[in-house]
Image: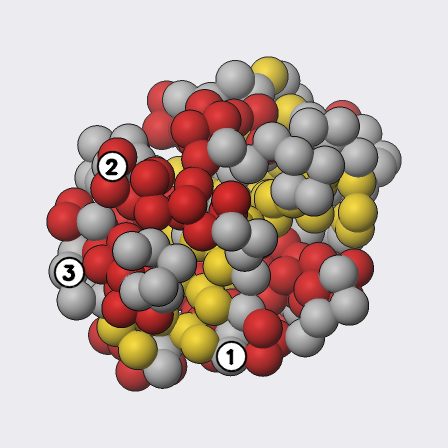
Amino acid sequence: MIALDLDETLLNTDKTISEKNAATLRQLHAAGIKVVLCTGRPINAIWKYLEQLGLTTSEDYTITFNGALVIQNTTKDVLAQSGLSKQDFQPLHDFAAENGYPLDVLDFDQVYPVADLKPSEYQKMLKAPMEFVPTAFADLPKHLFSKAVMATDPATLDQVVANLTPELHKQYHVVRSQPKILEFLAADMDKAVGLGQLLTHFGWDFDQLMAFGDAENDLGMIKAAGDGIAMLNGQPEIKSAANHQTPTTNNEAGVAAYLEQVFPKVLA
C-alpha cells in the first residue's frame, strides 16, 4: 500500500498532480498496489484527484480529516470514524476567545466558523465544496466533530503555537498542516490511525505500507510505515524520521522519481 499526503507531496505547488506522478501511480494501481490519499480535507474536496489517479474501484479508500475518517471512494461507505465532542473543544474555544484568535470546527460534512470569535479566513483558504455555517460556540450541534482549525497569517499562527499551554497540548494533537493552518485533532489522532484501520481491513500491517509526506501532520505515518519517505522539500523533522528521501521535490515529480527506483520492473 502506498499512502500519499497531498500538499507539497503529491501535488505541485499549484495544487495539481503532474502527469508523471499520475501515470506512475495509475500503473502501480493497475498492477495491484493500493494507492491511498491521506488528507485533512473531506473526500468531495479531492474527488478530481481520485478520478485522475483512477482510484474509483470497490477496493479504493481514502484517509480524510487527517485520520479521523476512512471512507470508500465510490460508495462513500465509512470504514472507520472517530472524533471529538462539542465539549471537548471548550478549552480551545476559551483559549481563542482570551487571545483574539479565529476558530473553525468541522464535522464530517460541513464547517462551523465560530461566530463569537474573530472572523476566520478558512473558507477563503480551503476553496472546497463544503458548506460553511457560521455558528456561535454555544449553538454548535451536539454530535461528533472531526477537528478544529485556526486559519490566519503565519505570524499569528507562530504566536498561537508559542502561547499553547501544556494542558492544550495534552488535550489535542496539534499540527501545522500548512503555514496558515493549525489543526487540533483528538489527542491520539493522526493519519497513521486511519491507515492502521485500513491495513487491518485488508489483513495487512505497517510493514506493507509505504508513506510519502512533507509536513508535521505526516509524521505519524512516516514513522509507522515500513518505508517512510520524506519529500526533498520536506521539513527537517520529517526528513529525520524518514527511512528514505525523494530524489527530487514535489514540483519535480518526486513521488514518481522514488517509485521508479523501487518498482523498476513494474514501471518498465
Give how far apart the Cα atoms at labels 3 and 2 are: 13 Å
Q: Nearer the viewer, residue 139 or 66?
A: 66
At a point 60% along the width and 31% down the height, the residue shown is: 56
Q: Nearer the viewer, residue 192 or 94?
A: 192
Three-letter amino acid code at disc 3?
Thr
Q: Nearer the viewer, residue 146 or 25?
A: 25
At a point 79% along the width and 47% down the height, the residue shown is: 79
| First of labels 3, 1 by sequence position | 1
| Vertical position of residue 50 compared to residue 168: above or below | above
Asked if residue 138 lies left or right of residue 253, the reply is right
**SS assignment at label 1:** loop
Where residue 164 sits in the image (x, y, percent)? 46, 65
The residue that disc 1 covers is 226
Q: Which mark is residue 18?
A: 2
The residue that disc 3 covers is 248
Three-letter amino acid code at disc 1?
Gly
Give how far apart the Cα atoms at labels 1 and 2 are: 26 Å
Asked if residue 37 lies left or right of residue 145, the reply is left
Figure colour scheme: secondary structure
Three-letter amino acid code at disc 2?
Ser
| First of labels 3, 2 by sequence position | 2
| First of labels 1, 2 by sequence position | 2
